[in-house]
Amino acid sequence: MSGLLALLDDVAAIAKVAASSVDDIAAAAAKAGSKTAGVLIDDAAVTPTYVTGLDASRELPMIWRITKGSFKNKLLFLLPAALLLSNFAPWAITPLLMLGGAYLCFEGAEKIFHALFPHASHEVDADMTPKDPAHLEEERVAGAIKTDFILSAEIMTISLSVIEAPNIYMEAATLAAVAVLVTVAVYGVVALIVKMDDVGLHMAANMRLAASRAVGRGLVRFMPYLLTTLSVIGTGAMLWVGGNIITHGLEVLGWPWLYDEIHHLAEAAGQAVSTASGLVKWAVTAALDGVLGFALGLVLIPVVTKVIGPAMAAVTGKSAQH
């Protein structure tokens, strides 16, 4: 009997340790996830554009394919790479993070530039020939998974930079939890967004109550505005997050001036108001990071389109279309 009681005590102790580990993983995953909010907003804002213009019956299957590709990106490729970096080349994390931040700045600035000067994008205009729907779907899914890989790399690297795990197993479990939770959250929201107009159409056509039909028609009219708003928010989030990553990375590498200046300006703005000082400091920091990100992105546009793009096209043998 004493042996059985000792065994039960051991099992209880192991259960307590396991529960504590789960709590630690959940807490670390939540902390890491909060740091990637800007990239998540961009991911959720960008993805619906890949399924628009195709048959409504193909929207959810396409999102599911993109979701599976996102899981593969994060769990099979980026998770092992992140663990290798963390344990064998931690010095490379900040430069890689800054490289991803620069990419976000470029993407955000390019979206604004093309919105202001749409005629400047000849490559996009040249690719408007009609295509077979199946072929177009394959292209869209492949493009979405490629974009997801870049954003997922940024998410995993940001997560890695804030995780404080006692060993590689806890680190791997936390990164895996972040990968799963982020993917489910982003593509769950995307699925809701792209099917909301279909829900509205169904309500407008089939509901018995006039009020319900009116709500359905309202949803249909509202969705284009929602997608436009998400696109604007996503672009702003890219610039804000990208700029913040650059300034913080410079501070880590020993050049804190820019980061300190933004911090001091945000502190001064917060002290100048009597209420909501925390919100004001955050808004000023985000705005200044966004301005920095936009300026850096504008500088990178000719570098990417005239130098990096053609060089990659020469190596891969593919045209340098964006």
Image (spheres, grey):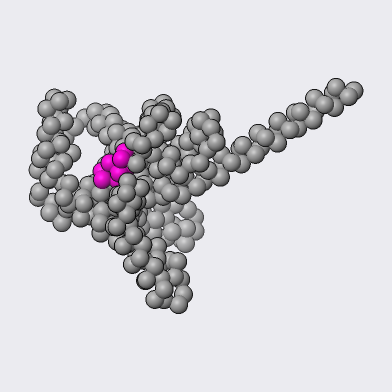
Residue 72 seen: no
Residue 99 seen: yes
Residue 206 vs residue 10, the one in the foreground: 10
85 within the magenta span: no
Instruction: Tell me: residue 152, above or below residue 235.
Output: above
Residue 316 vs residue 52, the one in the foreground: 316
Q: Quadrant of residue 220?
A: bottom left
Residue 262 picture location, percent across and down: 32, 62
| Point 34% across, 36% down: residue | 92
| Point 29% across, 57% down: residue | 257
Left or right, 291 with respect to 24, comes to left
Left or right, 25 with respect to 47, comes to right
Q: Residue furthest front?
A: 254
| Point 39% across, 68% down: residue | 267
Q: Quadrant of residue 258?
A: bottom left
Residue 171 vs residue 137, the one in the foreground: 171
* Image: magenta residue range: 95-103
The N terminus: image quadrant: top right
| Point 25% across, 31% down: residue | 139
The C terminus: image quadrant: top left
